[in-house]
Image: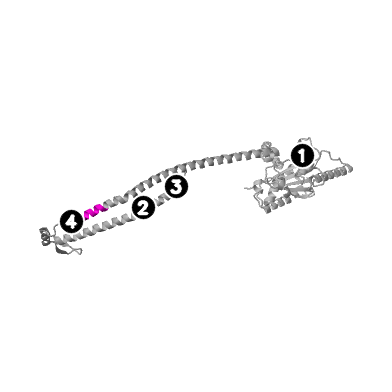
Amino acid sequence: MGWKVGITTLKLTNQRSKKSRAKRTGYLRAVVCEGLSERWGKDEDIDRNRSRYNTYTGIASGVELAESMTKEAAEYSAQRKAAGGRALRTDAAIGWAMILKPPAEIINTMSPEQQVKFFEDSDKILVDIMGDDNIRATALHRDEQAPHKHYFGMGYTRTGELCVDKVINPKLYKKLNQEYPRLMREMGWDIEDCTVYDSDKVKSMTEDEAAAYKRVCKAKRQQKKSGVDSKTYKAQQELQKIEKEKDRARLSRDLALAAAQQAKQQTATVHQEKAALETNIADLKEQVDSYPTDLQDRLDALSAAANAYHNAARADESEQLIGFLKKIKVNQKKPDGSTVKRTIYDVWQEYQQKQEQKLAEQAEQARQGAADSQRRLPTFQSTTAQHGDSYAKNF
């Protein structure tokens, strides 16, 4: 999507006109001194520290330019009167001022080289439209919100007549709003045409169509930024800026509230996790403290069971029961599937050995587990003590 360039014009006179067109007319000396090196005016957008970066062509002083243009107009008036014509009116417009103002959001994103090319390409077109012989001075301002360019010139027609009304008119506006964008597009700039009332187009319309077309053009002109004076426009811009600041403040406040709420929830969660962890630590410590005692009880029980078993096994070795068991044989199935005859006493002895071996293994495992637990217990308690303060931290 393209963008539009604002080009405004103003007729310049040595007196403040009282005619209806005075709203499009400015006082020569004040206008040129505001735009050139003097930088008259109280515009708050001007950064005086950056005015040294402004560049000028032609007559750089507004005072000198006003005197030069006034003198030139007076000489022209005298020559015309001497030739039998009428002298210029004292309040007649003798010159014009033009401002080329690209959108700030576009020109400010360009590199310095792109900005220079933009104004150079614009110069080629505007100098041709206004006439090279007419332009007396230019000023490229870089001390305001965005770079823009001023042009100042005399109001000579192509035939050499000093008549600003024949220079600044609807035909010029059409060129500035349609021809300038078209030529800039040919140079590679994505610039759109501006809406302008086309008198030639109206000639082919009916009366109703022409009236409707005129209303549309008028409505679009009223919507343009240039439809209000500079003070009103700047006031509107300030109001928009204030509204944006309010929106940013509201957003910052909402973000702060959300962050505070999230922090509060996180703090509550941390407290819950801390309480649960402290409970788990207390339970685990209690279990660890009581574990060696429980294990010793179990070891004692295993030892007592083993002793009772050995005593029972040895009690009847010399009695008749042992002899009887040695005489009775039974078939015992071997792992390979075959069978062998063995006495009941031999089977019982084998069983006894296996049971003793099993009891010995269980006792050894229990003793090893108890030793491992007691080795771990001092390390765990040391770690708990070391990190105890961290759980008491104020969240």
Identify the mark nearer the N-term, 2 or 3: 2
Residue range highlighted in magenta: 299-311
How packed mark 3 is, by other alpha carbons closer than 10 Å (few <14, some 14-19, many 20 or more), is: few
How packed mark 1 is, by other alpha carbons closer than 10 Å (few <14, some 14-19, many 20 or more), is: many
Identify the mark nearer the N-term, 1 or 2: 1
Residue 311: mark in rendering: 4
Question: Under tag 1, what secondary structure?
Answer: strand
Give the alpha-carbon distance from disc 1 to disc 2, as whole Å.
98 Å
- Amino acid type for the residue under numbered disc 3: Asp
Question: Under tag 3, what secondary structure?
Answer: helix
Q: Quickly name the residue at label 3.
A: 389
The label nearer to you, 1 versus 4, is 4
The residue located at (43%, 50%) in the rendering is 386
Mark yes or no: residue 125 visible: no
Residue contact at pointers 1 and 2, CB within 8 angstroms = no
- Amino acid type for the residue under numbered disc 2: Leu
Q: Position of residue 114 (x, y in %)?
A: 67, 53
Question: Under tag 4, what secondary structure?
Answer: helix
Identify the mark nearer the N-term, 3 or 1: 1
Residue 377: mark in rendering: 2
Q: Quickly name the residue at label 1.
A: 25
Give the alpha-carbon distance from disc 1 to disc 4, as whole Å.
132 Å
Query: How would you classify the magenta stretch by its main secondary structure?
Result: helix
The residue located at (19%, 59%) in the rendering is 352
